[in-house]
């Protein structure tokens, strides 16, 4: 896989000096066209063999282009904050918004490769991580991100020569560490693991570009011209409003009117029974949240339901059992300008809790397969692929120690009407009802179909949906509290 990068490509100094001014001007023009259009973001991954010129190339890109619009990230060993969250969390936070370029050094490929080279992971674990990475990169490209992946290569002899030269010069001796020589000793294994990683993750959407790192002039022109060509190709397509035509396989038709929501039966609970059950359940949850075992996990609660289904009331009964320093409620509404400039899932990744904490989503990432689907705010292909992306997201949360509990609060159309009218009649509740709530009732059947599809496709063995019969608020609140306690107890063992 690396044969072409070991041919000894060279560019003499005179040719390099002649080429650089024009290349820099074109890169700057492309960068400002990108900034003006703001239709997509660019993510440049810098990976490869140690001392193959990765750092020097990053510095050149910042020199040749406007560094105010390039976000450069060099990831090192995860911090304590990063270690408490899923592996991809710190990379999600570093994604550039539309119109910007993000350069990522030591990105999501570095740790899996090093762990496998050092035999700290099994081949199956590496392949599992690469599957996650492929799905992540496919999601980025479908969200419009231009992903450019460079692998800087040196032959074994070339790496040894570079290390010796740097070590001999007092001005550069500091750049050679014991780790560099360790990886040189592991070169053959490193090359084998890297070759497997590159073959597995070089896709049509995000291919690897292998750079011969033996000559500084050549690698600089190679990276600059490759990045320019990719930018210009995407900018030309964007300026012509071209987008790839995407389609999705059809969902099964409704043969009869039987569905999972209609199978729910109204459940009633007297106030006296409710009050007798509420405090013990809140105390049970309070004790669970204070255990040492919970301190090593975190809790992610998801509340979905039609307007006036009682999500707010149920959330208040849960937080009544928790220390105010321990939880955060995240209400999800229409995305802000900042959020619209990022891939869809970005705004949810940023709110993930640390260990021993809870985050409660009042509406969530399921908006893509509910309101965005029904209202036509995204394409069919977008919301169809969202099912798999959501399942991926929740799997990563759980693998990192999160306890994910999801509730759909179901009420009848008649009960919703009664609650709407009650809200309008009470001055202190009028803020809870809007013209949009009334408009949504006109699409009641469309939302019910979307909910049924959502449950079918995202209720997994690790993160199942709990459907709550919510016509009676007392019953709903008790069922939700009891479910949270049971799921936390089961997770903590």
Image: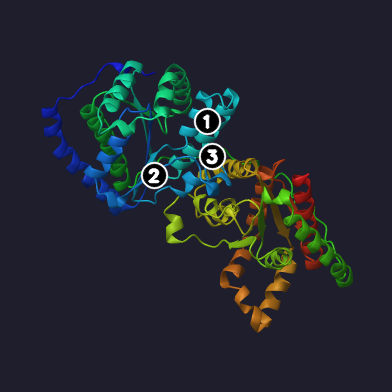
Q: Residues within 10 Å of mark 1 (few under 14, many from 20)?
A: some
From the top left corner, tell me how far across and down residue 205 is, in percent.
42, 33
Q: Is residue 77 above or below residue 154?
A: below
In this view, the residue in front, 261 or 101, is 101
In this view, the residue in front, 353 or 312, is 353
Q: Which residue is mark 2?
A: 73
In this view, the residue in front, 81 or 197, is 81
Q: Residues within 10 Å of mark 2 (few under 14, many from 20)?
A: some
Foreground mark, 1 or 3, reads 1
Image quarter of the C terminus: top right
Give the number of marks: 3
Query: Looking at the image, is mark 1 or mark 3 earlier in the sequence?
Result: 1
Q: Residue at x 52, y 25 (%)?
A: 118
Q: Is residue 149 left or right of residue 315?
A: left
Mark 3 lies on a secondary structure that is: loop
Mark 1 lies on a secondary structure that is: helix
**Real-space CA distance between mark 1 and mark 3, rounded to the nearest whole angstrom:** 25 Å
Foreground mark, 2 or 1, reads 2
Q: Is residue 192 left or right of residue 226?
A: right
Q: Is residue 200 left or right of residue 489?
A: left
Q: Residue at x 76, y 60 (%)?
A: 286
Q: Report which quarter residue 215 is drawn in.
A: top left
Q: Which residue is mark 3?
A: 248
Please indicate, yes or no, whether residue 478 appears anywhere in the rendered image: no
Mark 2 lies on a secondary structure that is: strand
Q: Residues within 10 Å of mark 3 (few under 14, many from 20)?
A: few
From the top left corner, tell me how far across and down residue 471 is, in percent.
78, 65
**Real-space CA distance between mark 2 and mark 1, rounded to the nearest whole angstrom:** 21 Å
Image quarter of the N terminus: top left
Query: Looking at the image, is mark 2 or mark 1 earlier in the sequence?
Result: 2
**Real-space CA distance between mark 2 and mark 3, rounded to the nearest whole angstrom:** 36 Å
Q: Which residue is mark 1?
A: 130
């Amino acid at each position: 896989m690396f044969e072409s990068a070991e041919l000894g490509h060279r560019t003499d100094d005179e040719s390099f000096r002649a080429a650089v001014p024009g290349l820099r001007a074109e890169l700057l023009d492309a960068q400002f066209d990108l900034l003006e259009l703001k239709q997509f973001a660019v993510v440049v991954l810098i990976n490869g063999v140690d001392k193959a010129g990765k750092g020097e190339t990053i510095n050149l890109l910042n020199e040749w282009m406007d560094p105010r619009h390039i976000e450069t990230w060099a990831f090192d060993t995860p911090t304590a904050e990063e270690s408490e969250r899923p592996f991809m969390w710190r990379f999600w936070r570093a994604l550039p918004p539309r119109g910007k370029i993000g350069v990522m050094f030591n990105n999501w490929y570095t740790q899996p490769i090093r762990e496998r080279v050092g035999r700290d992971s099994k081949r199956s674990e590496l392949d599992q991580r690469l599957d996650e990475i492929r799905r992540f990169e496919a999601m980025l490209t479908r969200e419009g991100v231009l992903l450019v992946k460079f692998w800087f290569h040196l032959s074994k002899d070339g790496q040894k020569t570079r290390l010796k030269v740097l070590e001999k010069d007092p001005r550069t001796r500091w750049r050679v560490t014991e780790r560099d020589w360790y990886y040189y000793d592991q070169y053959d294994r490193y090359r084998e693991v890297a070759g497997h990683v590159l073959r597995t993750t070089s896709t049509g959407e995000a291919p690897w570009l292998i750079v011969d790192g033996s000559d500084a002039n050549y690698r600089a022109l190679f990276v600059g011209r490759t990045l320019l060509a990719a930018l210009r190709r995407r900018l030309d397509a964007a300026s012509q409003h071209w987008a790839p035509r995407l389609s999705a396989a059809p969902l099964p038709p409704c043969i009869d009117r039987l569905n999972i929501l209609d199978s729910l039966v109204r459940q009633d609970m007297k106030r006296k029974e409710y009050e007798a059950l509420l405090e013990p359940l809140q105390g049970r949850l309070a004790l669970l949240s204070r255990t040492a075992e919970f301190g090593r996990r975190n809790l992610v609660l998801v509340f979905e339901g039609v307007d006036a289904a009682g999500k707010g009331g149920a959330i208040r009964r849960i937080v009544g059992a928790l220390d105010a320093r321990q939880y955060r409620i995240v209400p999800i509404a229409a995305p802000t300008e900042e959020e619209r400039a990022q891939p869809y899932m970005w705004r949810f990744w940023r709110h993930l809790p640390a260990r021993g904490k809870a985050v409660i989503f009042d509406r969530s990432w399921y908006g893509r397969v509910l309101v965005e689907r029904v209202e036509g705010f995204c394409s069919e292909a977008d919301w169809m692929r969202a099912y798999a992306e959501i399942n991926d997201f929740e799997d990563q949360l759980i693998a990192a120690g999160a306890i994910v509990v999801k509730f759909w609060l179901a009420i009848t159309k008649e009960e919703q009407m009664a609650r709407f009218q009650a809200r309008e009649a009470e001055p202190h509740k009028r803020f809870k009802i809007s013209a949009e709530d009334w408009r949504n009732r006109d699409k009641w059947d469309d939302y019910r179909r979307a909910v049924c599809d959502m449950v079918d496709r995202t209720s997994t063995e690790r993160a199942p949906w709990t459907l709550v019969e919510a016509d009676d608020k007392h019953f709903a609140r008790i069922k939700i509290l009891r479910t949270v306690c049971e799921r936390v107890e089961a997770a903590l063992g």
